[in-house]
Amino acid sequence: MINCTYITNIIGDKNNRTSCLYQIGLIFQEVKQYEEALKYYRDSLKIAEELGDLNMEVLCLEKIAKINELQGNYPEALKKYEEMQNIASKQEDAIGKFLSLGHIAEIHLRNGNFPEALKQFEEALKIAEDSKNLELKFHCLFSIAEVHKIQEKYEEALKEFKEVLLIAEQLEKDSLKSMTLIHIAEIYRFKKKYQKALIKFEEAIRITERLGDLEGKFQCLLNISDIQIMYGNLQVSKKALEQAFRIVYARMGIYDETSKGAPQMTDELNQKIQDVDKRWKQLNKLLKES
């Protein structure tokens, strides 16, 4: 165990001490010993405040807030992110302010406070637009569109996702493009515009195959299978579902579609297995009846 008192005693220079304490905090956070990490971040923050080192204050506050967030202590996380935002504003640090706004928005979103989440994302969007940083603008608009999608404000969400798609194309980043196409396709499906949904899912699947993105491909295949059932195309649906089967069981090491090997069973993987099994039983029943 690293002794904080010993560290502070042997390092005389406060600038070196605050940096050292921060680094120790990072080590404990990496191994998920959050209480120990918090102790070192707080010690580092205290010295940074004495020195008036605003940059180190921002770093410590962000780490403290993130751990509070991971622990589910959202009020304390919000408080620290807001302190971080205030310091960034004083320094006219646009990126620091942008990051704090994003963190604050995500907590409000997680808590179901959609108006406040949107307010924070929109403020962050202004910073992104002022900086003319397309990637920051992409992430802000994407988040705003997601909030509208969650609220079932599909027309607003669709308009925003289409703008996001144009930015992804400008950035020439296929991973962002496929992610956006999947959201657009899902909205078309929710609006019962199934043909448009299929076109977007198929466009997304071509990109995911090129990228080797099995998660994105899996998501597309399940949706395609469901839509083809609605059209009565049971064999087409079965083909899509079989491909989804191969992906999810490849994650378990049963097939060789991925070289990553068999991971431990997780809640996410277990849910994917259940999703596929449920659809497979429904499809087999329909095939027998047809």
Image (cartoon, rainbow, N blue to C red):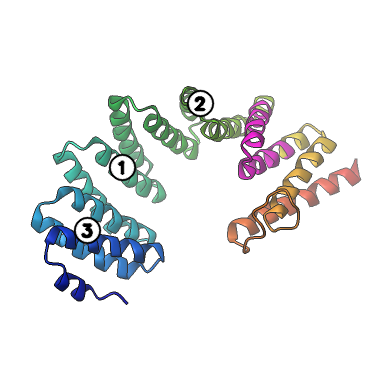
Q: What residue type is labelled 2?
A: Glu
Give the Cα distance between marks 2 and 1: 24 Å
Q: How crowded is mark 2: few (under 14 residues within 10 Å), some or many (20 or more)?
A: few
| Highlighted range, magenta | 197-225
- On the image, numbered disc 2 is attached to which residue? 172
Decide which of 84, 106 is in the foreground and name it: 84
Q: Does the magenta stretch include residue 215?
A: yes
Q: Please, is residue 289 above or below residue 8 in the view?
A: above
Image coordinates of residue 263 in percent, x first then y, are: 63, 61
- On the image, numbered disc 3 is attached to which residue? 19
Per the image, label 1 sits on a secondary structure element best described as helix
Quarter holding residue 202:
top right
Image coordinates of residue 99 in percent, x first then y, are: 31, 42
- The residue mark sitting in front, 3 or 1, is 3
Q: Quadrant of the N terminus?
A: bottom left
Image coordinates of residue 239 in percent, x first then y, are: 80, 40
Q: Which amino acid does label 3 sit on?
A: Ser
Give the Cα distance between marks 3 and 1: 21 Å
- On the image, numbered disc 1 is attached to which residue? 99
- Labels 3 & 1 near each other (Cβ < 8 A): no
Residue at image coords 75%, 43%: 243
Decide which of 201, 112 is in the foreground and name it: 201
Residue at image coords 25%, 76%: 3
Is tag 3's residue or tag 1's residue first in the polypeptide sequence?
A: 3
Q: How crowded is mark 1: few (under 14 residues within 10 Å), some or many (20 or more)?
A: some
Q: Which amino acid does label 1 sit on?
A: Leu
- The residue mark sitting in front, 2 or 3, is 3
Per the image, label 2 sits on a secondary structure element best described as loop
Give the Cα distance between marks 2 and 3: 38 Å
Decide which of 17, 56 is in the foreground and name it: 17
